[in-house]
Amino acid sequence: MKMDVVRISNLVKKYSNITVLNNINLTLNEGEIIGFIGPSGSGKTTLVKSIIGMEKVDNGGIELLGKKIPNLKVLNDIGYMAQSDALYEELTGKENLEFFCKLYRLSKNQIKSRIEYTSKLVNLENELSKKVSNYSGGMKRRLSLAISLIQDPKLLILDEPTVGIDPKLRFSIWEELKSLKADGKTIILTTHVIDEAEKCDKLVLIREGNIIATGSVDELKQQFKVNTVEEIFL
Ligand code: ADP
């Protein structure tokens, strides 16, 4: 039986007096790629941050991998890539990756193999000795993605992962996300890109802090009586 990787019940999040997430209930299964879609300002990032415990919520409960969060141990099993890159600009790409390896207490051998694997995945293996301050925006995005995968997490949460990444690399990253999924990993991502939404097993439609629908692309097309994913977005 598939495990519930994410279980959210009655989640409410406010900033001052403004309700940004309004009684969210959501259960996500393992081994799926789930896309959070919705207009800018609808609450996608806030939901993602609440899930990983970066935002204190006003009501409700969140369980990840069967454990109530906040829980430091669970964080080891979660890879997170924020919308803005949190990198050490004065360090090289490799030193950034090493820093996170040490944070997760990987062994020397693991450090070597995980840096090799993740940097190759994002096509940065030949740029690792450069300082991040000399990286382009796209390279920084790619390094952030490598970092989110560094400890081989079970659950990967990516906020707009392919912004600023060219189509060719975007394609290869998607191929890799699919193979991570085939390994049983669960991937949550937020996106504005229609062809990315189409690749998700499940979509969660968010409007003004509410989940208005969840389901596969085909289920949502039926539910909204439309023929294209574009129309789901509208
Ligand atoms: P999305 O990711 O869908 O673009 P966000 O989750 O970033 O949406 O934002 C949802 C709403 O919460 C927006 O109205 C935004 O202005 C507001 N918001 C986000 N972060 C903060 C914050 N730190 N303080 C106050 N309001 C915020």
Image: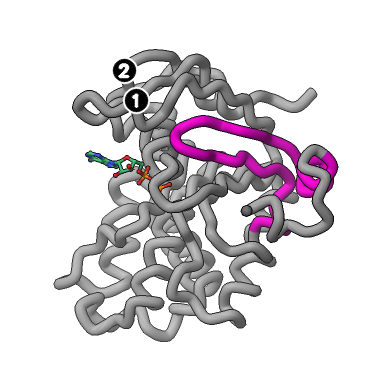
Label 1–label 2 contact, CB within 8 A? yes
Residue 13: mark: 1
Label 1 and label 2: CA atoms lie apart by 5 Å
| Disc 2 target residue | 58
Residue 197 quadrant: bottom right
Instruction: From the viewer's side, name the closer residue of 112 and 179.
Output: 179
Give coordinates of residue 231: x percent, y percent: 71, 56
Local packing at callout 2 (Cα closer than 10 Å; few below 14, some 14-19, many 20+) is some
Quadrant for the N terminus, please. Answer: top right
* Secondary-structure class at tag 1: strand
How many numbered markers are drawn?
2
Instruction: From the viewer's side, name the closer residue of 9 and 128.
Output: 9
Q: Which residue type carries mark 1? A: Lys
Give coordinates of residue 85: x percent, y percent: 30, 61
Q: Is residue 204 magenta?
A: yes
> What is the span of residues highlighted in magenta in the rendered image?
197-222
Give coordinates of residue 88: x percent, y percent: 20, 64
Residue 109 quadrant: bottom left
